Image (cartoon, helix red, strand yellow):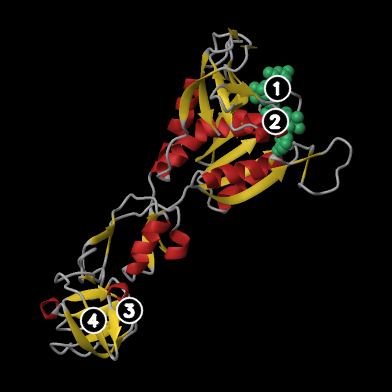
Amino acid sequence: MARTPVETHAARVRELLAPLRERGTETVGLPDALGRVLAEAARSPIALPPFRNSQMDGFAVRAADLPATLPIRGEVAASPGEPAALAPGSTVRIMTGAPVPVGADAIVPVEAAAMVGDAVRLPATAAGAYVREAGSDLAAGDVVVPGGIRLASRHLAALAAAGLTDVDVTTQPRIAIISTGSELAEPGAPLAFGQIPDANGVALDAASRASGATVVHRGRVADAPDRLAAELDAALAAGAELVLTSGGVSMGAHEVVRDLLEPLGAHVDVLAMQPGGPQATASWRGVPVVCFPGNPVSSQVSFELFVAPMLREVAGLPAAAASHAPLAAALTSPPGKRQYLRGRRRDDGAVETVSGPGSHLVAGLAAAELLLVVPEEVTALAAGDMVEVRAL
Ligand SMILES: Nc1nc2c(c(=O)[nH]1)N[C@H]1C(S)=C(S)[C@@H](COP(=O)(O)OP(=O)(O)OC[C@H]3O[C@@H](n4cnc5c(N)ncnc54)[C@H](O)[C@@H]3O)O[C@H]1N2
Ligand code: MOO
């Protein structure tokens, strides 16, 4: 059977997921806005800084009075309240962030001052020295963060400094994840012989969230089509815009995903790649369903290749980094399949495989930091040959 090119399936998934690109907006509080994409420019209702204030702990002065020994007429702290105007020929102690009194036009840092009894000797100082003018960062009404920006802590700092408490962000794609397989148990539950913990559920949940989506439902079903149908309905009831399934798409006697969805028009394929050979795409009551193979490495690599790129784009995240590096040692690869081998980079920059090519080697994937991509037509590579490398 001819295997379907990886790009053909990628294009099919891309088309199926196109509606997810159209995002609405919602309002969230600043602490919850981290990592979200600002829907439109946020403007500052106040100037930054909001008032003229001192950049140093020191003395507020009129520059024209200096150099001189001046009497100290009190103190201005960084606290609410307007300070009294500075009388000519005098100074006040002032703290960083405190309002500069009317009449003062410069600050002398405390290190440059010398006490002379109750008075203070201050050197010549330029007008404007260490004075932070109101609006010198941003004028009231100016854009504090432009729309389309993925919010990091520095953006939240600027928004909070502007006194904003919540912002409009684009909604996150809502994903449901369903693990299929009668052998699956809740991780941590005692295992009967023949059972294994469900690894794909937590992995696809984490991968979805790391790609900027939100997970609205997670389920696990035995190899029974009516159970899968009920779980798909539960996913839609939870508001899922996209359902990811794992398992049940190859050629066994109990392929629950195929059994339920193929008669309804699912597209089932065997791709020219490993891991991630068997794949399917479907719709459930109009909602896209992307079906990954059950092997844990296969489902994770499939997510990375077919679903993560669109989610990252929507979330304003950079695409996974791809580069080339020399191979540390020779390797062989089966013909007709693009191999995604688990690897790591050595100190000398060469890349080597970790663990084997088997799609069940979930611990091996955990030990890897990158994937080595061996093209379909390449069956042998020598040490030093350049290979494509994808960061994990
Ligand atoms: N006769 C053939 N057999 C198989 C073929 C084939 O072409 N002809 N393809 C193999 C390949 S490649 C893959 S990949 C798997 C895919 O099979 P399914 O998608 O139907 O997945 P399952 O059979 O349900 O599971 C495969 C494997 O993964 C384990 N698994 C499943 N779900 C989980 C989970 N949530 N957490 C951890 N491990 C999971 C499952 O126990 C199986 O060991 O088919 C090959 N067979
Ligand atoms: O192609 Mo399957 O995904 O190796 O194990």
Between the C-alphas of marks 2 and 1, the distance is 7 Å
Between the C-alphas of marks 2 and 3, the distance is 57 Å
**First in sequence: mark 1 or mark 4?**
4
**First in sequence: mark 2 or mark 3?**
3
- Give percent across and percent down for residue 382: 58, 9
| Three-letter code for the amino acid on which mark 2 is drawn | Gly
Q: Residue at x 40, y 54 (%)?
A: 151
Q: Residue at x 48, y 30 (%)?
A: 13
Q: Which residue is mark 1?
A: 356
Q: Which residue is mark 3?
A: 95
Label 3 crowding class (10 Å Cα cut-off): few <14, some 14-19, many 20+? many
| Three-letter code for the amino acid on which mark 3 is drawn | Met
- Give percent across and percent down for residue 150: 39, 50
Q: Residue at x 57, y 19 (%)?
A: 271
Residue 276 shows in this picture: no
**First in sequence: mark 3 or mark 4?**
3
Between the C-alphas of marks 4 and 2, the distance is 70 Å
Disc 2: residue Cβ within 8 A of ligand 2's nearest atom: no
Residue 301 shows in this picture: yes
* Mark nearer the viewer, 4 or 2: 4
- Give percent across and percent down for residue 349: 53, 25
Q: Which residue is mark 4?
A: 121
- Mark 2 vs 1: CB contact within 8 A: yes
| Three-letter code for the amino acid on which mark 4 is drawn | Arg
Label 1 crowding class (10 Å Cα cut-off): few <14, some 14-19, many 20+? few
Element under label 4?
strand
| Three-letter code for the amino acid on which mark 1 is drawn | Gly
Q: Is residue 111 left or right of 327 when viewed as pictured?
A: left
Q: Which one is in front, 53 or 30?
A: 53
**Which numbered marker is on residue 262?**
none
